Image (cartoon, helix red, strand yellow):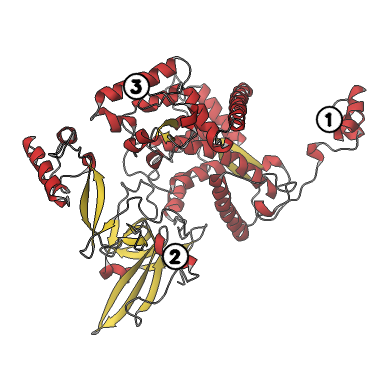
Amino acid sequence: MAIDKILPFLEQGMDYMGEDESNSALHAAGYLRPDELKRRIFDILPDPARTNLRDCRIGDIPNPVVKRALVELRKVVNTIIREYGKPDAVHVEMARSVQMSGEKRKEHNKRTRDREAVRDGAANTLRDLRSRGLAVNLRRDIPAYLFWEEQAHECIYCGQYMSQEQLFSGEVDVDHILPYSKTLDNSQGNKVVCHRACNASKGQRTPYEWLAAQKPNEYERVCQQVSSLMHRGLMPYGKYRKFLLKELDSDEFIARQLVDTGYITRTTAAYLKCLFENDHQVLGLKGQLTSELRLQWGLNTVLRQDDLDLKNREDHRHHAVDAIVLALTNRSRLGQLTKIRKAGYFDRQTGEVYELPEPWENFREDVIEKINAINISHRSQRKVSGALHEETLYGPTKTTGQFVVRKSLEMLSANEISMIRDDGIRKIIERRLEQHGIEIGRGKKPDKKKWKEALVNMKMPSGVPIKKVRVLRKEQTIQPIRQGKSSEAYVKPGSTHHLCIFEWDEKGKTKRDAVFVTMLQAINRVKNKQTIIQRTHPERPDAKFVMSLSRGEMVQANWKGREELLVLKTSISTNNRLIFARHTDARKSDEVQKMAFSPVGYGTLRKVTVDPLGRIRWAND
């Protein structure tokens, strides 16, 4: 309808938009230009899911990472507005991948169209196969079919031919080259098709970890196979490189997150424009500029104790330093920075170093004062979701608290040999290890290569191969998930959902205890329509409920004579220990400075909440 209205005026020679109303085909047809359209301006950020698309032009967002980012953004921005009023402008740091040149956009669009054409061709082929009687599911099987074509119809691991019938009959699996559990890489570039037996044998290992030590010739054959596919133009180079990877690098996950950051930044800018009449009041800035200004103003060392002039990413407050720089970035300062860059940062004749003037006197000292006063707000993890238990199934024994679990020989530790349930098999393995000069027992850590060589090709006296053994386990936390005469299954519960701290008086002394509730118990309470957090001690009804704690929740505590603001990282139910970290510590979980509290120290804990502005309030738990 719009085309029918506008086209006659275009045929008369009018411009589509036209700055002059007399020469605008849009105006002549009765429409307004986009810049003339009035939109609703909000006092606070609205809920994007409940907003008219005309008023808040971001629409439905399928990406869960972006949804979470907008939820947190809305909390912070609206809290700031309620406390200080609406800002005059908002500056957003743009990820480097956000700005894409016209040429790169063309390349990106071409790649997208090419991929769509290939998928459409695969879909047509599968429709034809389905019409001939094969059980084909287009949504599930198109990726598998494309991988099958990419691999020249061969299993990527054993090299044997895979027919179309095998591909859709359940004999073939889609496998992650680098384990998804370790890399969180679920992209098409990390997937292949292989026989189900090969996938089961590989398990949660990389091709190198699986084959290089135990079957080097087989690993070499796999590498040659994928190299051939790559040189024939069938397999992408990036996928080929994954087969050669010897050690997993967690930075790859960070790189993947940066892609989300680009999308988040664009969507964030669109969302923030709901607050302003003019689009230019939301300014997007490149990350390189933030880094340069931070260096010029000497802010890299604000959170460092050493002499390295580098940003300290191990402290959450480095984001606040960036926010200060972003807020003070304007055209004038960027112009000054450009001049300094062109001059080479110093005068070649006099040797004078050019520096960008500080925004005001004692600027760095003021930044340090404000940064040191910041309390970090952490998001608590109270949602009942995630792994309910470990994947391993345990078998019961006649002894209470004792179970058996099946393990492959190569995955056994030196301490587990003595716990092999079958006496005959245990003695055979012990003799083999003794022949290779390997000591077993608690605390022994034999060479991995020597260990695998010793346990390869193990056989019973009858000639039956020994591939897996049953190992005895004493576990207090193992619980049944299925019980009955015909079938029963026991599992080790997954993470702790929350814990409740209780205290009571016993002979004039205050006693404390923590009751740990696993994710499995929490979901059962939800199913049974019970309260998730139960304020009565299961064994001492007279005990007083003190507080509940989930991961990410915060306390103020006395740690080595100092009052500290801490965030709960994890808990250990077997010895009633709670593991905290300082609220500012942004290091990985295995590097963070851990602060452990036992029941004796529970009395020094007081649960608090920290709002988006960093204000501490006592939690009324």
Of mark 2 and mark 1, the one earlier in the sequence is 1
Instruction: Name the residue nearer the viewer: 483 or 11.
Output: 483
**Residue 107 location (% of width, % of height):** 60, 22
Instruction: Name the residue nearer the viewer: 294 or 123.
Output: 123
The residue type indicated by label 3 comes to Cys
**Residue 482 location (% of width, % of height):** 38, 60
- Residue drawn at x 40%, y 44% is 302
> Which quadrant of the view contains residue 211?
top left
Residue 606 has which mark? none
Residue 17 has which mark? 1
Q: Residue furthest top?
A: 232
Of mark 2 and mark 3, the one earlier in the sequence is 3
The residue type indicated by label 2 comes to Asn
Q: CA distance from mark 3 to mark 1?
A: 58 Å
- Residue drawn at x 31%, y 80% is 504
Q: CA distance from mark 2 to mark 3?
A: 47 Å
**Residue 58 location (% of width, % of height):** 67, 44
Of the two numbered discs 2 and 1 in the rendering, the one whose residue sits closer to the viewer: 2
Q: Residues within 10 Å of mark 1 (few under 14, many from 20)?
A: some
- Quarter of the image that includes the C terminus: bottom left
Q: CA distance from mark 2 to mark 1?
A: 61 Å
The reply, left or right, for residue 225 in relation to residue 404 is: right
Instruction: Name the residue nearer the viewer: 40 or 83.
Output: 40
The residue where tag 3 is placed is 223
The residue type indicated by label 1 comes to Met
Element type at mark 3: helix
The residue where tag 2 is placed is 524
Q: Residues within 10 Å of mark 2 (few under 14, many from 20)?
A: few
Of the two numbered discs 3 and 1 in the rendering, the one whose residue sits closer to the viewer: 3
